[in-house]
Image: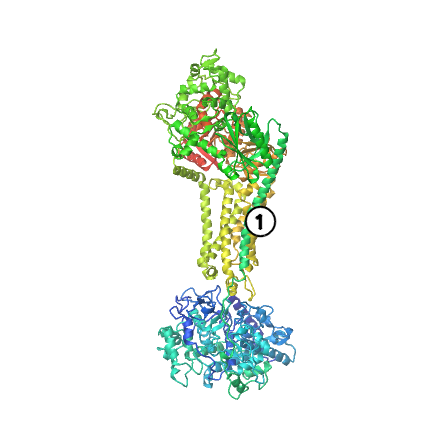
Amino acid sequence: MRLYIKHIGLVFYVFLVTCSHGEDDHGYDSEEEEYIAEYEGYDGWYNNLAHPDWGGAEMALTRRVPPAYVDGVYYPSGADRPNPFDISDATMKGETGSGSLLKRTAFMTFFGQQVVEEILDAQRAGCPPEYFNIKIPSGHRYRKYIPLDEMPFLRSRYDMNTGFNPSVPREQLNEITPWIDGGLVYGTTKAWADALRSFKDGKLASNEDRGEPQFPSENIIGLPMANPPPPAESDQHTLRDVTRFFKLGNPRGDENPYLLSFGILWFRWHNYWADRIKREDTTGKMNDEMIFNEARKWVIGTYQKLVWYEWLPAFLNMDEAEMEENAYDGYKPYIHPQVSHIFQSAAMRFGHTLVVPGVARRDKDCDFFRTTKDSSFTPEKYNPIGRIGTRTCNSFWNPQLPIRETGMESYLMGMASQHCEREDNIILEDLRGNVFGRLDFSRRDLMAINIQRGRDHGLPDYNTARRAYGLKARKTFEEINPYCNNTQEAAIPCSILTENLANVYNGDINKVDIWPGGLLETTKNGPGELFRTVILDQFRRIRDGDRFWFENDVGGPFTKEEQEIIRNITIHDVLILATDINEGDIQKDPFHFYEGEKCYDEAVEAFNLTISEHELDNCTDPYTFDYFKGSEVSFVLTFLAAGVWAIGCVVLLYVLSRNRRKMINESRKAQRRKSRKSAKETTRLYSTREWCGDGQSERPIAVRLGPGKSITVLNDRGNKTYRTIDLAIHQKITLLVCPDQRRKMMTIVIEKEYDLVMKFDTEEERNAFISDIESFLTDPAIGVGRERREVHQAEMLRMANTKVQRQKTLERFFRVAFAQAFKLDVDPDDITEFKSEIAKDVLTCELTKQEFAEALSMKSDSVFVDQMFDLVDKDNSGTVSFREFLDIIVIFARGNPDDKLELMFNMYDVDHSGMLTREEFKKMLKSMMEVVSADLEPSQLEQVVQTMFSSAGFESKNELSLEDFNQLMGEHKEELSNASLQIQGQEAAPVQQETKTHAPRGTVIHRGNAPSRAKKTIIRAYANKGQGEGSGNKGGGVKGGIQRRQTRSVQIETVQAAYPKTDSEKVFGQLKRFIENERLKIFWLVLYTLVLAAVFAERAYYYSIEREFAGLRRIAGYGVTVTRGAASAMMFTFSSLLVTMCRNLITRLRETFLHRFIPFDSALAMHKIIALYALFFSVMHTIGHGINFYHIASQPPNDLTCLFRDFFHRSHVLPKFHYWCWQTITGFTGVLLVLLACVMYVFATQYARRNVFNLFWLTHNMYVIFYILMVLHGSGRLVQPPFFWFFFLGPAILFTLDKLVSISRKKAEIAVFKAELLPSDVTALTFKRPTSFEYKSGQWVRVACKTLGSGEYHPFTLTSAPHEDHLSLHIRAVGPWTTNIRHTYDPNTVREHPYPKLYIDGPYGEGHQDWYQFEVAVLVGGGIGVTPFASILKDIVNKASSNTRFPCKKVYFIWVTRTQKHYEWLCDIIREVEEKDTTDLVSTHIFITQFYQKFDLRTTMLYICERHFQKIANRSLFTGLQSTTHFGRPDLPSFFNSLQDEHPDVSKIGVFSCGPPGMTNGVESACVEMNKFDGAAFIHHFENF
């Protein structure tokens, strides 16, 4: 793109030139004949118009020798070559201090350094950093100071378009232009040049404001100049501010005082030309810009001349013939000027052998300055004061100190008065071991670096390079330098070649690196054959390919006259004109220093022309640095604070919850005090709290002593009995009193019952209760013994026999009793497998009357319980023993009809007279009705009894003997015989197998004795046994009852299933049922998990493999892989959370066909699961970043600048952990996110929702802040461009629109006028119906409670019917919100206050509302899924009773439930339907699937009486309903098949099911099976809960 734009610029430029000049003008103005020159650009582009990029900055180096990458692409060469340290020590180590044989000066050497910096800069490391470290040999001096095994080495920057295949191997970059175009004076960009300018009179800015007009302006603006740590400041271990440097065009111009001196020289040379041009502008037309550009042109021209005609001949010792041979013969646009790899990495480094260990400064009088404390920051222990010169190794990156001390001229004159080091192979220690480095490796071996750099650039071996340049390859090591035996020309002894070099390369000359090989070619004349050829070739190409070369006559920048002026300018002239050096202060040729020239003798006397390193201060020792230093405290405190914050959130939650409970307790205490004051003395009511066991919450209770021989435990309001302790059956009560823990607890231990553990508010209250109960027990009217003991609280709680423990014992009791009675296989957990202690507990366990009643789910004071208990309690002990209970159960289980009738007779023969009076018979019937809360009018009951007596011929009898009773019940003997307690999943005895028969109304399982009969039960719903047989219950005898008839073709069968016996079978069965019920949820959860894993894996793979080159993973390890994967997973999960909260969208979608495939009702559960995923990945991300931040904070600052390019920091700043964590938007927002997540997650726990729900709602609504922080977190671009929006945008839009819909929707605030706490944790709410609220039966609403948060809505199906004036809901407490709603409307909570108001939103529809569109509709409800049908059933009856015309003619309602106990409220609704359904529109069947499993003793024992009771009362003994009760699961295919026979003219039958997936799937399967055959089509609609 950049090249394309420049090409457009070129076309525009050519167009302007063509329009401005005639064809033959050749650059001259046609009127004034004034030459108009094009000014050279800064970045080198468009120097060559045919190839605009040739010579451009930031372009790849060129190759003049073939690459030798190991893999042919990018991997460094020389894998089989020796360690660079070994080569450096073997071939370049030696004594320094020998002067140049050619009398060349240090001026020439350092002039050469700034020439290199003019055409070449490839020192910057690649980005991301690639380390190609050099192993430090054992015994090396570095190991003494630096505890590292390798010297850091960073590979060079390279062209990202190269290095992909052998055809395009990696090519390193030259960051500046190869042209001699003044880059070291002005920089290589216009912006950099402008930063140097004063914008006044065309000059560069000076430091005049600080009183130093002779120096360039200080870098107060912070230009990004090179700024390594000064190695001499070893005691400080720090970086220094780049503002201490002078602003120069060369970013590395402040490396040392010698290079800086030349930088200042060129600064002054420019300003000299600016003054001269302004002075010579007699017209006054030239402005600042024109003067600057013209001065720049002359500086460049003179510099080109000085380099080619003065410095290069001196450097290469070229004679006139050689100069003539390489004379300029015009611009050649076909020549590529770019610097070659071999020039950069080897040849031009020849100058290193000429570098001196120090430079002596002098004045005009040849007095040489001695160093002072102001000359450097070198520590005193290295003796830096009083030295003849400034030490090179100790002056790196602090050059301004000695220059300010004695002036730049002192260095220029000093360098000109000092010979450079001899042309040989020896490199001074300042470079070979003490050149500057990073903080963690302050001193480096530049010679080892030279060798490694050549390998980094893929340079081949020495001989390959020679052949590439047309030179003869060397066969032996001695041939490398043929002059080594020539004493006249020898600069290097042969032993260096034949011994040192040969040994280090193991005698293989074809492995010799170019740098040591070329260096050892050196002769007294300077560079050897290879380096000389490479250098000359490079400078010739730079000159010949430069369109702006000062000698170019065709379109060049200068006229011939101007060219001549430049040719006559020498380096001496520049020194005289641009500095304070006067004529005669310095020799004419500063590049050489000959005897007899200015200050020669003084130099000989001072340091013998060449300074030895022994005459200077010692180089400071190498040192290392821990970049993590300074981060320790912030690192530890940050993560410690995060941990403390998380713990603090938990503690805060606990404290707030405890305070809330405390407030509630205080309120209860106040109420208890109030209750105690209002209680009568005779009742002795004591308010306290009962400890219910470990893990159980305490409950407030009131204990009443009396009346009579009883202790009653009630709720705290005294209106509900929890437990009654009958003291009449106890001889002694034990009181355990706690002497510790504030002395508030005590336990009442009652034999054969569970203990009552109480916790009083104060010790005084406890003591008062103890005193009163002791007095109560010792009262003669009570006469119960007592024992009082003190037991420590911990021991008391451990010993306590709680209700939970008692319940376990009772469960074993019933399990074993039934196993014995029915001869069932005993579960492995049962008594035969118990330890002897447990067996003893079971066998000695005795039931109290209350426990007996609870087992029957009946009230302890009911007549049935009284009669049954008295019958079972043979020893009149007041309790039922295991044997007593077993005896009566055996009769029920195995007895013949006569035995069972005798049992029933004896139950109600209260006076044991052997006669059952008519009143006692009535009492029996009434007690059975009482069992199920049913009722009969006295006249109806009398009619039932009279009918039964008449049918048996006992009209005149008032008493029945056992024989009479048998005769009265004779017609039911067969049913009684077959009605033994067949346990669900257990096979009956052969003589009692079930048979499929057309049984009379009320029959669930009709068993026959014939073994050949099929094992099925056929129920004839609501049909008498044969029409017109006149059973005694014609008319039903029930209030509102009717005779219901159904054709014999309609059949509902129960399916018996075998229950698992072993633990493994149980676990497998549970797992199977779970998968069956939750398979749709499992599918979507697994799918989501797989997608989430893929999101994680994609980023992890990307940063491990595809973005390996980025470098971050290399410094941080695979922690980056984990954190990046976790970050993407977090983005995905937190975005997904919004989708699960789009309630309106989910509501609409669940009305579509999609609800069959997507469990929309599980959105909240999915929300929680996704939140847990998000938490998991958040923790992973946070911990990973803790590790990553450690690695990042321990990296060199330059590496971090590369890796995090959007995070700028000054070059002297070492970013610490607190910078990355607290001063970057990514880090700071990350901290805030962690803190906010802690708050949100802690207060989202179930504990928080139950105890401080309002805080949960408040903190959860901070999600807006959370997502804003997530967006900001990614926008920091720390590691990658932000792409959170990829995940977030869609869900955010959906959520926002969904929220707007919720806000815009009119929501009604409704007053609740009735609230009931029904059994099974069901809360019934009845509230006013809004005027405009219209709905259909089966629809649902979203409900929010004002006190629980007006914004939190939950969906519930309406149980009211459309014709009713009110709305009603039945809400079962199964979660935090439903539990809180139950507590909110608890009368104990509301007390005298009005009920909290509700917000309703809706109604919303579902498939069930279309029931009326089918002539025949089948409603199948399971569990809580019956709620939609409550409204439908009432609506059906209303429509039928009001003669409303609608298509539906018959409705079958099938209710499948584990036990009717869970949904007693539905029984009331069904009862209402039965009373109002005068047209027999609805047929109801109830299937109870729980039987023996949970040992509901009432269900088990009353099963036998069920059929008798139905005959008598026309109602189910279990439900009190006329509906038939079945035991087992419905056989739906058989039922559907019978419906086709019953309704042959119906073409479509609507089937509507609601319940767990296992049930609805079964209904769907049955419909699919029936639809395979001809007949009515079964159209299935279902909902899952």
Q: Is residue 1411 above or below residue 144?
A: above
Would you say 561 lies left or right of 537 here?
A: right
Secondary structure found at label 1: helix
Q: Is residue 1223 above or below residue 1328?
A: below
Question: Residue 1130: image x %, image y %?
Answer: 50, 51
Q: Is residue 289 above or below residue 668?
A: below
> From this viewpoint, is residue 1310 visible?
no
> From this viewpoint, is residue 1081 visible?
yes
Query: Neighbour class for label 1 at 10 Å: few (<14), some, many (≥20)?
Result: few
Question: Residue 1563: image x %, image y %?
Answer: 44, 34
Q: Residue furthest bottom?
A: 596
From the image, tell me which residue sits under label 1: 1264
Total marks shown come to 1
Q: Residue furthest top?
A: 956
Q: How is the image coloured?
A: rainbow
> Which of the 4 image quadrants contains residue 94?
bottom left
> Which of the 4 image quadrants contains residue 719?
top right
Question: Residue 1217: image x %, image y %?
Answer: 54, 59
Q: Nearer the viewer, residue 1260 or 1085?
A: 1260
Q: Residue furthest left?
A: 1012
Question: Residue 1500: image x %, image y %?
Answer: 44, 27
Q: Is residue 102 above or below residue 725?
A: below
Q: Amino acid at mark 1?
A: Val
